[in-house]
């Protein structure tokens, strides 16, 4: 049988490999739960039984909707700020010299650690959470936008200059399309980062949302609900990442998409 016609092995099928990974994770979770015997560590079956109570609970659905709205608001804010700045840093040494020290200081800082300061400034409402989500998403998007701008062939920019394009027009007509594959990789990382920072911020400023639901369940010793909420968050992250990767491949089908399959 030729190489082209040979049947795929099970680990070469993404869907089957994912299913095997989920089964192995469930078995490991169940084995650890039995071995440790803690009431605070229920098994996967117990957690799965709690999922209908969350899915059909209006309060839980409203909490998830609130969190999702804040997450996407912060995500959009980050894209509007980080993509143009990253492209400008990649094409202008003056812009790079001004903003690089600030970016290098902010990059290793845990974004959720800023929540107490933002709460003092802006209160416990949604604005503080949206702002910290935007800050968490901005850095990976900015970094990949910068990398994409740096890799653009100089001939493209020179040709645009020869045609009379100004700096702003070159940025949106030449630099942005050429850097789009790298930018979208950063945006994909930002989707998962938005989910992580969203939950962290809501666990600190406990008023509403999924983070508050998670912490309240733990305070009330409803451990099965805690793990059920974690499962909901895991599914949300997986679905959002899967959807974004499909969109990314569609928008950059003309480019090498192998980089987008790597984990960040």
Image (tube, rainbow, N blue to C red):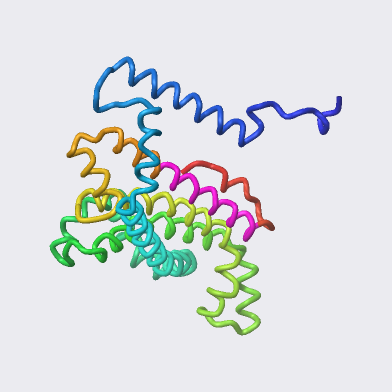
**In the displayed image of the protein, which residue is found farthest to the right?**
1
Residue at the extreme top of the image, as rendered: 35
Q: Residue 72: where, in percent of width, then height?
A: 40, 61
Residue closer to the observer: 152 or 9: 9
The reply to whether the magenta stretch includes residue 118 is: no
Magenta residues span 234-252
Q: Is residue 79 depicted above or below 107 in this figure?
A: below
Q: Tally the marks.
A: 0
Judging depth in this view, the residue of 233 and 65 nearest the camera is 65
Percent position (x, y) of residue 133?
32, 58
Magenta segment, prevailing SS (helix, strand or loop) = helix
Between 215 and 17, the residue placed more toward the observer is 215
Which residue is drawn at the image coordinates 59% and 67% (left, top)? 177
The residue furthest bottom is 164
Residue beneath the point at 26% across and 66% down = 127
Quadrant hosting residue 233? top left
- Residue 246: say if magenta: yes
Is 121 on the left-hand or right-hand side of 84? left
Residue drawn at point x = 37 percent, y = 62 percent: 69
Q: Give the percent coordinates (x, y) of residue 39.
A: 24, 24
Q: Position of residue 22 (x, y in %)?
A: 50, 30
For the point 52% across and 53% down, the residue is: 185
Query: The N terminus lies in which quarter of the figure?
Result: top right
Q: Is residue 16 left or right of residue 198?
A: right
Q: Does 25 sit above or below residue 62?
A: above
């Amino acid at each position: 049988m030729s190489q082209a016609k040979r049947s795929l092995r099970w680990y070469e099928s993404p869907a089957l490999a994912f299913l095997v990974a989920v089964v192995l994770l469930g078995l490991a979770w169940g084995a650890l739960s039995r071995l440790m015997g803690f009431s605070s560590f229920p098994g996967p079956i117990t957690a799965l039984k709690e999922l209908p109570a969350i899915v059909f609970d209006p309060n839980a659905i409203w909490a998830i909707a609130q969190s999702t709205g804040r997450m996407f608001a912060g995500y959009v804010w980050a894209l509007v700020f980080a993509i143009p700045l990253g492209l400008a840093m990649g094409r202008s040494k003056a812009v790079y010299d001004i903003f690089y020290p600030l970016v290098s200081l902010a990059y290793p800082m845990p974004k959720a650690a800023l929540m107490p300061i933002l709460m003092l400034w802006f209160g416990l409402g949604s604005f503080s959470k949206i702002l910290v989500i935007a800050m968490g998403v901005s850095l990976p998007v900015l970094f990949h936008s910068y990398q994409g701008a740096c890799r653009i062939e100089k001939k493209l920019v020179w040709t645009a200059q020869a045609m009379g394009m100004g700096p702003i027009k070159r940025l949106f007509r030449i630099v942005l399309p050429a850097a789009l594959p790298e930018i979208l990789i950063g945006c994909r990382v930002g989707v998962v980062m938005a989910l992580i920072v969203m939950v962290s911020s809501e666990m600190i400023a406990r008023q509403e949302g999924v983070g508050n639901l998670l912490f309240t369940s733990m305070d009330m010793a409803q451990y099965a609900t805690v793990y059920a909420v974690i499962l909901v968050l895991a599914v949300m992250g997986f679905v959002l990442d899967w959807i974004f990767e499909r969109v990314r491949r569609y928008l950059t089908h003309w480019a090498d998409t192998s980089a987008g399959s790597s984990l960040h």
